[in-house]
Amino acid sequence: MDLTNFQKYPPFRLAELHAHIAPAISPSIYWQIAHDQGFKLPKKDYHEFIEYVTLSEKRKMALNDYFGKIYDPLLHKLSSGTFAQEKAFYETASGAYRNHIDLIEIRVNIMKSNNNGQQDLDHIIMAELRGMERALLEYPKLSAGIIFCLAREFSVEKNAIMVDKAIKYHKRGIVGIDFAGPATSSFHYKDYKAIIAKAKKHGLKITAHAGEVKEADDIWEALEFIKPQRIGHGIRAAYDKKLMKELVRQETVLEICPMSNLMTKAVENKEEMKWILQTFVENKVKFTINTDWPEMIEGAHLWRQFAMLLEENMLTMEQLQQCNKTAFAAAFAKKGGLEAYL
Ligand SMILES: [Zn+2]
């Protein structure tokens, strides 16, 4: 079986569990969204714009720099509002299917997509669902779901509003809750114990960005207080034997995003990435392969990441197939396409 020719002859269909909407919108769609609404862009030329927003081998950036310079001021601004969100969810879900993905979970912070509170959250959520539903209607073999990202920098009260909205729209396809954003001194998982228990009671599944960078090494806390089914990234766990044991015990699945970690320098180089992945294999920690930012990193489409991992001998074909199986099994999204939510 040859993964290097995946695009032409895919040996198997993929599941994507960790993709944020803003960096999952292709630059050409951003270009359309911006011009449809008359937004001013930092670059007037299309190709210069793509270079400006995309991370690549030549253009790596620390996570916080990218957030401060591009993600928050530009991507969030352009992808905000009902018009942009509907188009973004439709284009992203349908584009995923065309790129060999049969199941996609897209995550979004609805309070960062509503033009700083100017737009009604229910309108935003309905726009996202409309976009997803249209893609599911057009591609009947596709399954999808939406995960709401709480923000570490938001107050507990503000995040609780998003959890209530997720519960309200759960039957329509809001399938999970995530914790995202840079570490802050005021954020503690213990403050979310009751809120997350309520979300779980209503059928929502939980994931949390944790253990991506040394500064946000709080997997232990997440496991203790919110017991998520999955952890976003979690790569720091490879350096903690006891923690790996606990992940296995709780059957927590890691959402590994190899290219993202390399581009944001969360991982030093490919050797370190390989060591991390093989350490998880040896210690029987379950993990999946995801993109995080499929369109804002050059060559980051999911099938290309699988091919890269094989080419660079980071994982064997059998191990890659196992990752993909684990992803389908650990998915929050209901399988069965549009029918699943009707
Ligand atoms: Zn992420």
Image (tube, rainbow, N blue to C red):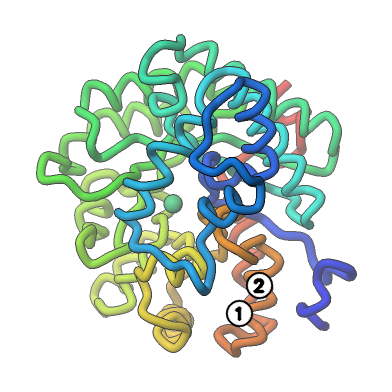
Q: Quarter holding the C terminus?
A: top right
Residue kind at label 2, given as amino acid type:
Phe
Find the residue positioned furthest to the front: 44
Which residue sits at x=31%, y=33%? Answer: 197
Q: Residues within 10 Å of mark 1 (few under 14, many from 20)?
A: many
Q: Quarter holding the N terminus?
A: bottom right
Residue closer to the observer: 54 or 149: 54
Residue 335 position by quadrant:
top right
Residue 22, position as x, y percentages in the image: 52, 40
Residue 107, position as x, y percentages in the image: 51, 40
Which residue sits at x=25%, y=77%? Answer: 240
Residue 122, position as x, y percentages in the image: 50, 12
Residue 91, numbered label: none
- Secondary structure, mark 2, is helix
Residue 230, position as x, y percentages in the image: 43, 53
The residue under label 2 is 306
Residue 12 position by quadrant:
bottom right
The residue under label 1 is 309
Which residue sits at x=45%, y=20%? Answer: 114
- Above/below status of 273 relative to 21: below
Q: Is residue 263 left or right of residue 341?
A: left
Q: Is residue 337 left or right of residue 162?
A: right
Residue kind at label 1, given as amino acid type:
Leu
- Above/below status of 237 relative to 164: below
**Label 1 to label 2, Cα distance in Å?**
5 Å
Q: Is residue 283 visible?
A: no
- Secondary structure, mark 1, is helix
Contact between marks 1 and 2 (CB within 8 A): the answer is yes
Q: Residues within 10 Å of mark 2 (few under 14, many from 20)?
A: many
